[in-house]
Each structure stands twice: as structure tokens, then as C-alpha cells.
Image (tube, rainbow, N blue to C red):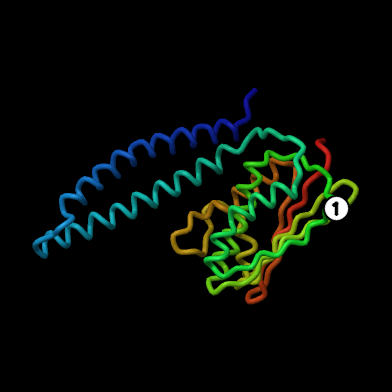
Amino acid sequence: MSDPYTELAELAGGFIHEIKNHLSTFGLNLQLLAEDFNDPQTQRERRAFERVQRLQNECERLVEVSNDFLRFSRIEQLNLLPCDLLVVLEELIDFFGPMARNSNIKVNRYLPSDLPPVFLDSEIFKQALLNLLLNAEQAMPKGGEITIQATISPETLTLNLIDTGKGISQEGLEKIFKPFYSTRPGGTGLGLPTTKKIIEAHGGTIEAQSEPGKGTKFSIRLPLKIS
């Protein structure tokens, strides 16, 4: 018997995919319309051009939400392989590096050199961590520091990501992993829920600790063995 949740996710994914097809047609026609008004000669044409631009922005926003929802709904079976977490993290930090430098953010690493292999779908796991790094970057508009720590116990590896950003209220902490909750203008509210879903698909857990003005700490706990 099929899982009702899986069936619902597949149905929602198909629905969003169909919407994206229509959005592509809509966006293309808006682009052609914008080209027609690219050099407005009258006040009426300028108003029309501005309205077309607003519609283009809304269309792009819908595409972004659709893409985030598809990523959220399609995290199911993972290809778990033993991975060197140090390599995975270095690849991610290297990718995030240019954005960190542009945002005046320093990334600190406190990672033991003898970390045991962890069973990961490395590309999907990096997506989860990237969501956390982007969340931290957005919380530090004037720059700051991100610290990545790892500790091990006999059965668990704990990975901490700590930022020096503006922090999160207790009310916000209770909602941050709920789909579509966002305090960022234009945010889809699916980044952290997607991260949580990815971590749980790896058999792990994630929790957040924070106070306004004191930064935020995300702790990811991963099993060292596949159950």
C-alpha cells in the first residue's frame, strides 16, 4: 500500500510543475511585451512599461517559489554513501566563499582531522548546509562571522553552524522550520524546512538556539552508522 504522504507530495509536485510550464509561457510573453515598451515615448507608455516590469518581477517570484517547493517536496530516497565530511565541507565553503567575501563575512573552521566517514548523499547534504549559510548571510547585512564546528561521539557526529547575526526571537524559533514562514521580504520560507527535511532523510536531527542580538546556532546530529 502506497504512503499517502508520498502520493500527496507527488501530486503537489506535478501540479507545481504544470504551473511552471504556464509561468514560462507567461514570462516569455511579458519579455516580448517589455521589449515593445523598452523606449517609452509618452507618459502612458512609461506607465505601461512599469506595470510590465512589476508583472515580470511577480512572475520571477512565482518561479522561485515553485522551484523551492519542488525541491522541498521531492526529497525522498537518498543515495547514501560513506563520505569524508571534511571534503564535503571544504567544497561547500569554497563555493560560498565569494559571497562571504562580498558580504564581509569571515568563515571559521574548527574541524577535527580524524572525523570518521559519514553516510551522505553529498550533493543534497550540501544543499541543506548552503541553506543555513545563506540564512546566516542574510542575518548579517553588515558582515560578521560564521563558525563551523564538528564533534564526535561513539554513534553520532554533531555539526554546529554559528553566526554572529541579529538572532531569532523565541516565537521565531518555534516557526523557522515550518513551510512558508519567513521574516525576510521576498523569502519563500522553504529554505530551512528543506534543510530539516534533508537532515531527517539522512537519519539525523537539527535544532536551533538563538536570542535576539546574540546570533544563532544550528546543531545537526548525524548517525555514524546506517540503521
Judged from this view, the residue extending furthest toward the right is 154
Judged from this view, the residue extending furthest toward the bottom is 213
* Residue holding disc 1: 152
Seen at 16% across and 62% down, the residue is: 46
Provide residue 90's location: percent of width, then percent of height. Answer: 68, 52
Q: Amino acid at mark 1?
A: Ile
Seen at 37% across and 50% down, the residue is: 60
Judged from this view, the residue extending furthest toward the top is 1
Name the quadrant of the C terminus.
top right
Provide residue 135's location: percent of width, then percent of height. Answer: 58, 60
The number of numbered discs placed on residues in the rendered structure image is: 1
Q: Is residue 216 above or below residue 26?
A: below
> Does dot 1 land on a helix, a strand or a loop?
strand
Seen at 49% across and 32% down, the residue is: 11
Seen at 64% across and 47% down, the residue is: 126
Instruction: Using the image as rendered, state which of residue 65 and residue 99 is in the foreground.
Output: 99
Left or right for 23, reference 217: left
Left or right for 42, reference 179: left
Provide residue 44's location: percent of width, then percent of height. Answer: 11, 61
Instruction: Using the image as rendered, state which of residue 182 and residue 25 is in the foreground.
Output: 25
Q: Is residue 176 above or below residue 65?
A: below
Name the quadrant of the N terminus.
top right
Left or right for 212, reference 23: right
Provide residue 192's location: percent of width, then percent of height. Answer: 60, 54
Left or right for 9, reference 126: left
Report crowding for label 1: few under 14, some 14 to 19, many 20 or more residues within 10 A (C-alpha). some
